[in-house]
Amino acid sequence: MSVGIDDISFYTANFSLDLQELAANNGSDAAKYTVGIGQERMSVPGADEDVVTMAANACVPLLEGMVQRGEDANAINTILFATETGIDQSKAAGVYLHSLLKLNPRCRVVELKQACYSATAALQLATAWVARKPKEKVLVVASDIARYDRQTPGEATQGCGAVAMIVSANPRLVILDPETGIHTEDVMDFWRPNYRSTALVDGKYSTKVYLRCVR
């Protein structure tokens, strides 16, 4: 039996900022963004959007697809919500998502956090759960609003969006390889303490640490 991603959908805000305008405002060369990192626009969340509403927008097409294929959405018994933009220190954002989607109450909901890794961890956890109970499905969601300080190298890489995936047995899209590598090390290359609304980041240090760890 194989386990993997059966369906996938994503959502991003309807608003965006042209990086040509950002460059003009900052007095920098627009090619730094458009050529250097291959980015032309930066997504901006609406005043009424957060990680939950974006996640819901990403999930709706998945549930509609299940209905069209004659599948039972009650087979989703786990929601893994990966985010660095939590809205509560105790209650998982996925609980609100579960309510908006009107999913089966017989469902576990967990929020995961670890910088860019938590969605990957969620996929790996989902794979293990489905391997144990192949008739069940797991909804994996990654939703974030990234903010960096003005006039910093990371400013242009801000944005928002959500991706949702259904993990199941015998998937239609992608089979996930059970072989993985793991590593943890306490380094101060990227973090955002509770008292800050923007992240602290040292991208060059991140690259050095990553390359050292994979040797």
Image (cartoon, rainbow, N blue to C red):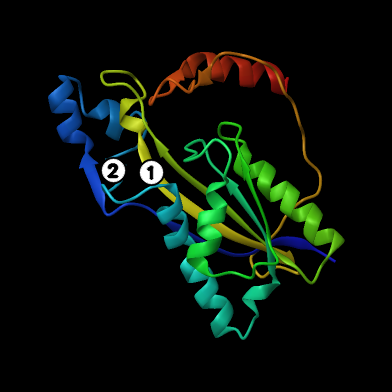
Specify few, some or many for label 1: CA neighbours under 10 Å numbering under 14, 14-19, or 20 or more. Answer: many
The residue shown at (24%, 45%) is: 16
Residue bearing mark 1: 160
Establish if 12 lies above or below 64. above
Query: Marks 1 and 2: in contact by CB < 8 Å?
Result: yes
**Quarter of image, res 127:** bottom right
Residue 201, percent from left and from top: 46, 18
Q: Secondary structure at mark 2?
A: strand
Which residue is label 2 attached to?
44
Label 1 sits on a secondary structure element that is strand
The type of residue carrying mark 2 is Val
- What residue is rendered at 64% in x and 70% in y? 104
Rendered residue at 55%/19% (across/down): 206
Say the numbered circle drawn on residue 184: none
**Picture residue at 36% right of the left edge, 30% below the top:** 147
Inter-mark Cα distance, 2 to 1? 6 Å
Q: Residues within 10 Å of mark 2 (few under 14, many from 20)?
A: many
Q: Position of residue 200 (x, y in %)?
A: 44, 18
